[in-house]
Image (cartoon, helix red, strand yellow):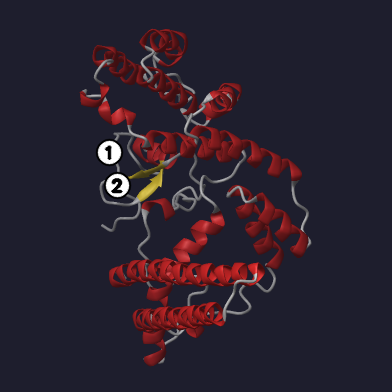
Amino acid sequence: MDSLVRDCSKLAKHQAASAQKTQAALDAAIEQLEAARRALASGAAQGSEVQRAKAQVDRMQAQVAEHAKELYTNVAKYGKHVEKVFKMDLGVVADSQAFADKRDVLAQAVLLHFLREGDFEAAAGFAREARLALPQDTQAQFEEMYRTVSAVRAPAHDLTAALVWAVSHRDALEAQGIMLEFALHRLRFLQLVEQGCAPEALAYAREWFPRFGGAARPDAVPSQLDEIEHLMGIFIYARRLSSSPYAALFSERRWEDGAHLFASAFCTLLGLSASSPLSVTVGAGARALPIVCKVSGLLRDKKVEWSQQNELAVEVPLPDDMRFHSVFACPVSKEQASADNPPMMMPCGHVVCKASLDKLARGVRPGAIASGRFKCPYCPG
């Protein structure tokens, strides 16, 4: 895979160089033709002018053909390299009927993906061609999100709209344990310090930070007192930030992180995941495809069929951002786990819900003794 990436970079550079040479040849030919036209228009043209123009065009045509031939040769070589690396038969894993009865669901997923990515023109075109109703309320919400995110990412890094939205949705965000408002106030504070406005930064901190510096509240809002105390020390180095212990806080990356945090919080309040489900699905499928094709080929060669429906025959390694936990059902109580009744792992490795674990510890079982010690109901012996 690394060799493919390197070769692709080389091919891109070669294509750029070929395009530059072709453009130069075309410009020279156009210049020669314009000179010949001016000479013809003035009446001072001779046969030699036309001949020189024709010769220039012929040279240009030969050069362009040579550059194109060289480029196409390299593209063909890269294509063979790709086929060699990804030598797989997709027919063994393809199922033409997989979405036979789910076309509407798939179309809705594609439409929502366009809206989430801010490509509203493509979303409108897709909705028209797929004969789907474009949800105007949803589009308006995502337009608001992208205007705000664009303002944060712009060179001026305007946080006004983001802060207004965070303050107006403070209760909903804090109920989800999302510290967006503090993160945005922190960005604005650092922005004022970076601009050399230390008095304004101190006044801003006094106005907004006290709310986040108290004791941790029971509504999932942690205290930011340690972070606030750390930020207050920045005034000592206000005149030499680049060589101070706070230099890392002023990385340009902080604006992209802030924009991503805002977009994630915005989607969370809409009841959507932070990442596009279609993007995650396609990414996970692309990672799984080589492994699944290889396993399917081995099973086919050994004339063995995988009997489990909707399950893969082998585990596919995925990055952390593509790992999602399914709902846990307690094997003792048969109840689904929740925030109030989370899964608990015992020393033996078996997992039960907290309510079941408490009952076992209290001896709420026939013949049990309420000693606090109990035996795992699933371990033998």
- Residue 17 visible to the viewer: yes
Of residues 85 and 374, the one drawn nearer to the viewer in this rendering: 85
| Residue under the point 46% across and 50% down | 328
Is disc 1 surrounded by few (<14), some (14 to 19) or many (20+) residues within 10 Å? Answer: few
Q: Secondary structure at mark 2?
A: loop
Q: Which disc is residue 29 wearing?
A: none
Q: Is residue 190 left or right of residue 3?
A: right
Closest to the observer: 157 or 227? 157
Disc 2 marks a residue whose amino acid type is Lys
- The answer to whether residue 208 is above or below residue 111 is above
Compared with 302, 204 (above or below) is above
Residue 294 or 45: which is nearer the viewer? Answer: 45
The answer to whether residue 323 is seen in the rendering is no
Residue holding disc 1: 373
Q: Which image quadrant: the C terminus?
A: bottom left
The percent coordinates of residue 23 (x first, y second) are 47, 68
Q: Is residue 238 left or right of residue 326?
A: left
313 and 123: which is toward the camera? 123
The residue under the point 45% across, 24% down is 221
Q: Position of residue 264 (x, y in %)?
A: 51, 40
CA–CA distance in space, label 2 to label 1: 7 Å
Categorize mark 2 by other alpha carbons within 10 Å: few (<14), some (14-19), many (20+): few
Residue at x 64% of width, y 49% of height:
115
Residue at the (51%, 26%) spot, across then down = 159
Q: Where does the image place residue 362, in percent across and percent down from the top left?
A: 37, 34
- Seen in the image, is 245 located left or right of residue 52? left
Image coordinates of residue 122 in percent, x first then y, are 67, 56
Name the element at disc 1: loop
Q: Compared with residue 280, is residue 182 higher up or lower down, i.e. above or below?
A: above
Q: Would you identify the image quadrant in which residue 8 lies?
A: bottom left
Residue topped by disc 2: 375
Q: Amino acid at mark 1?
A: Arg
